[in-house]
Every structure is written in structure tokens, then in C-alpha cells.
Image: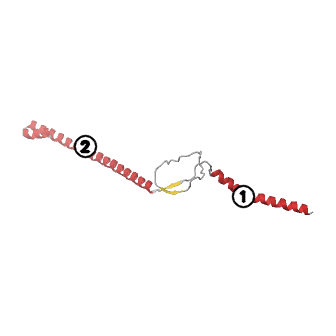
Amino acid sequence: MSSTLFRRAALAIAVLGLLAAIYPGYRYYRYFMTHVSTDDAYVDGTLALVSARVEGTVSAVYVEDNWTVAEGDLLVTLDPRDYEVRVQQARAQLDRARQTVEEQYAQVSSAEAGLQLAQSQLKQARADFERAKQLKDSGVVSGQYYDQAEIA
């Protein structure tokens, strides 16, 4: 009976020892899966270059060396002030362009008003010329008056 009790105790200690070794073994396995070691200091590995789509000042970094990252993980945060300045510059350029367009519309309106004035002056000059021609034919006005109306 003592041999059966001894066997059970030894089995229980072995099972507990095995269970106790699983966690450190798992940690050891994870460590060596993510860290490279060598005796001759020669490492053959894959380098992945990371390049930015946009330039800017980095304000926060969310990863460290040798961390495993997945596609879509946030790596860094850029300072938004640079982009805010660019947006303000673009808005200022847009405002200047709008002002230029408004100035051109004002110039068109001014030219149309000038055209209407010239047309009315032409109409008046034609009427004066016709009147001066009739008066000259009647002999009421001098040739000088007629010449001035013709030139106008």
C-alpha cells in the first residue's frame, strides 16, 4: 500500500512539475521566436523598409524595435499643425482666386456700362448730325456747325 501511495504521490508531483514547466516553457518559446541569437554574430534576416506617403513632423511613435506589427496598425502620429497651415494657405489662394473672378465680373459690368454710354453718345451724335444736316440744307446754320456735328 505504501508503494501505491508513493506511486500516486510521485505521479502527482510529476504532473504538477509538468504543469509548472508549461508556462516558463511557453515564455521561452515566445522569446526565441521573436529574438535572433547566433554564435558567430551573423544574422540573415529580412528587412522591411517603411516609407511615408506624406511628409510631416512625428509627434508620437507607437511601436518599438523588433515589434511585430500587422497591416493597418497605427505606427506613428504626425503633427497636424503643418497640414493646418497648408489648408489655410489653400483657403487664402481660393479667396484670392474668388476676388480675381469678382474683379473680372466687375470689369465686365463696367465695360458693358461704357458700351451703353458710347452707344447713347453715338445715338445723340447721329441725331445732332441729322439735325445739323437739315439746318445746313435750309441755310440756317453755318458750315462750321455742320462740320462739328459731322466729326462728332
State the quadrant of the C terminus: top left
Q: Secondary structure at mark 1?
A: helix
Q: Residue 151 lies in what quarter of the image? A: top left
In the figure, is residue 42 to the left or right of 23? left
Residue found at the very far top of the displayed protein: 137
135 relative to 7, above or below:
above
For the residue marked with disc 1, what is the amino acid? Tyr
Assess whether mark 2 and mark 1 are in contact (beta carbons under 8 angstroms): no
- Relative to 34, is 1 on the left or the right? right
Q: Amino acid at mark 2?
A: Leu
Query: Residue 102: horizontal and vertical position, in percent?
Result: 33, 49
The residue to which callout 1 is attached is 23
Of helix, strand and loop, which one carries label 2? helix
State the residue position of label 2.
115
- Compared with residue 8, is residue 37 higher up or lower down, i.e. above or below? above
Residue at 77 percent of width and 58 percent of height: 19
